[in-house]
Amino acid sequence: MLQAHDEAHDVYIGAGSNVGKRLFHLDAAVCGLSDIGTVVQCSPVYETEPVGYLDQGKFLNMVVHLRTNAKPREILGHLSRLEQEAGRERTIRFGPRTLDLDILLYDNEYYCVSDLQIPHPRMWERAFVIVPLADMTPDRPALGGIRMAELARSLQAGDEVRYVGRFW
């Protein structure tokens, strides 16, 4: 938990599931994130087509705003544990998964090491990430200086992102 003297960071985490009880896996992720900080807000859930490997079911996707004093590597380790607890198997790149968790943003910082890049390198071209993120941060600057809401509109024009509902 956060200590009064620790600096809290605003972290946005993308969550997706397309295997088994998809909403249950997202709920477990939201609950598990509270172990390393405070869940400030959750976006609505959207259903989307898979990207990359197409021979799989549709995804439920959302974004979680977490306030934490954890550093990026600590958060990545925690996300990996949550994925393992959900039974994630990494057999096909971009393949089916019970739970997929990605650090999208960490404050306004850039962070790049061999296995972690923040902001997430592919998020800017994925409607399933930007649309729920724009629900929470419509005026946040995106690539090229446009607002997140504008980027979401342009990406959504080419991809099917279907609103499912707000659960948290």
Image (cartoon, rainbow, N blue to C red):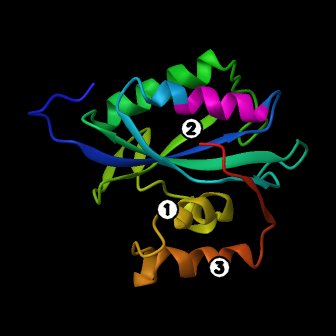
Instruction: Determine whether the residue tagged by mark 1 lies in a helix, strand or loop.
Output: helix
Residue 101 in percent (x, y) is at 56, 38
Q: Which residue is mark 2?
A: 101
- Give the numbered dot on residue 136: 1
* Left or right: 108 in relation to 118: left
> Quick one: label 3 or label 1, which is nearer the N terminus?
1
* Foreground of the two, 2 or 122: 2
The quarter holding residue 123 reads bottom right
Rendered view: 156 above or below 150: above
Residue 153 image label: 3
Residue at point 77% right, 34% down?
A: 22
Foreground: disc 1 or disc 2: 1
Which amino acid type is shown beneath numbered disc 2? Leu
Residue in the picture at 66% in, 50% down: 166
- Quadrant holding the N terminus: top left
Q: Residue at x 63, y 31 (%)?
A: 27
Q: Position of residue 72 (x, y in %)?
A: 33, 38
Q: Which residues are magenta?
A: 22-30
Residue 97 appearing in the image: no
Q: Is residue 146 left or right of residue 110?
A: right
Q: Verify CB contact (< 8 Å) between mark 3 and mark 1.
A: no
Secondary element under disc 2, as helix, strand or loop, is strand
Q: Earlier in the sequence, mark 3 or mark 2?
A: 2
Mark 3 to mark 1 CA distance (whole Å) = 14 Å
Amino acid, disc 1: Met
